[in-house]
Amino acid sequence: MAIRIRKIKGKIVALCAAKTKAEKGDIYLGDEAHHALSTKFGVDWVSEKRLTEDLADDNIKSLMLKEENKT
């Protein structure tokens, strides 16, 4: 899934590119770049045995979901 990296209210969030319109300042990551980063994150997270910890910052999660639901 392609994503956009965007700063909202001073926080950097990752958004689904299909659910959001491009804005000035966005960083676009295509499917391959997103897959590579997701794989790296998954491998590192598992190797550090941090699977049971909460991954999402609630404030950033809220900003992300609000932005994706605008359209």
Image (cartoon, rainbow, N blue to C red):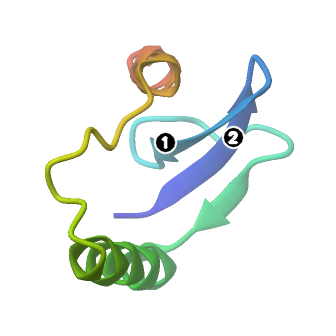
Q: Amino acid at mark 1?
A: Leu
Q: How many marks?
A: 2
Instruction: Please state which of residues 40 and 26 is positioned toward the viewer in this rendering.
Output: 40
Q: Which residue is mark 1?
A: 15
> Which residue lies at the image location 57% right of the left edge and 68% below the top edge?
29
Position of 42 with respect to 10 (left or right) is left
**Res 1 quadrant in image:** bottom left
> Which residue lies at the image location 48% right of the left edge and 49% below the top edge?
17
> Which residue lies at the image location 21% right of the left edge and 70% below the top edge?
49
Q: Which residue is mark 2?
A: 6
Which element is circle 1 on? strand
Q: Position of residue 47 (x, y in %)?
A: 26, 82
Which element is circle 2 on? strand
Position of 23 with respect to 2 (left or right) is right
Instruction: Please state which of residues 17 and 58 is positioned toward the viewer in this rendering.
Output: 58
**Res 41 quadrant in image:** bottom left
Q: Position of residue 28 (x, y in %)?
A: 64, 62
Q: Amino acid at mark 2?
A: Arg
Cα separation, mark 2 vs mark 1, equals: 7 Å
